[in-house]
């Protein structure tokens, strides 16, 4: 296993009982495509195959959904200047400190603006060539 960034919601798709058996919660997840418009809705249904071996994830999904954002530009571009940079990080931190919500600052789209958004956004900026 390697370190990485993920949406913490992925931790909630199942839980292990005392016998280390994964119990699926049937939570529904939404993934925004790279184009920033198309959305895939999916929900894991099982983790085991017919012989009860783990790692055989079964899921249902739905495509054809679209995301409409109130952001004029990219998610994370809080000042809407079409550039993802340190200025946006400062604005996201100010939103956190002021207890305000701005959809453009909610980088992981979890309904809150917090340190996770800052960490994800910093990693996005660092990965831009």
Image (cartoon, rainbow, N blue to C red):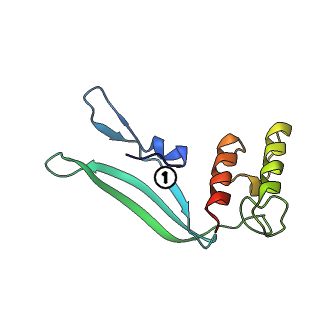
Q: Is residue 107 above or below residue 116?
A: below
Query: Residue sitting at 32 percent across and 30 percent down?
Result: 17
Q: Where residue 80 appears, x then y in whole percent?
A: 83, 65
Query: Residue sitting at 84 percent across and 43 percent down?
Result: 94
- Neighbours of disc 1 within 10 Å: few (<14), some (14-19), many (20+): some
Q: Where residue 112 appears, x then y in whole percent?
A: 70, 44
Query: Residue sitting at 61 percent across and 73 percent down?
Result: 35
In the image, 17 versus 87, the foreground residue is: 87
Q: Where residue 105 appears, x then y in whole percent?
A: 75, 53
* Residue where numbered disc 1 is placed: 28
Q: Is residue 28 above or below residue 77?
A: above
Q: Where residue 29 appears, x then y in whole percent?
A: 50, 54
Q: Where the C terminus falls, by quadrant?
A: bottom right
Q: Where the N terminus falls, by quadrant?
A: top left
Q: Is residue 1 above or below residue 37?
A: above
Q: Is residue 65 above or below residue 88?
A: below
């Amino acid at each position: 296993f390697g370190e990485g960034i993920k949406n913490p919601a992925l931790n909630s798709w199942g839980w292990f009982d005392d016998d280390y058996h994964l119990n699926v919660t049937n939570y529904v997840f939404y993934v925004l495509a790279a184009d920033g418009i198309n959305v895939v809705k999916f929900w894991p249904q099982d983790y085991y195959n017919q012989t009860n071996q783990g790692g055989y994830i079964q899921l249902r999904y739905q495509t054809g959904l679209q995301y409409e954002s109130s952001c004029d530009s990219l998610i994370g571009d809080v000042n809407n200047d079409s550039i993802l940079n340190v200025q946006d990080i400062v604005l996201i931190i100010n939103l956190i400190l002021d207890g305000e919500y701005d959809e453009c600052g909610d980088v992981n789209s979890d309904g809150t603006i917090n340190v996770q958004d800052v960490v994800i956004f910093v990693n996005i900026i660092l990965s831009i060539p």
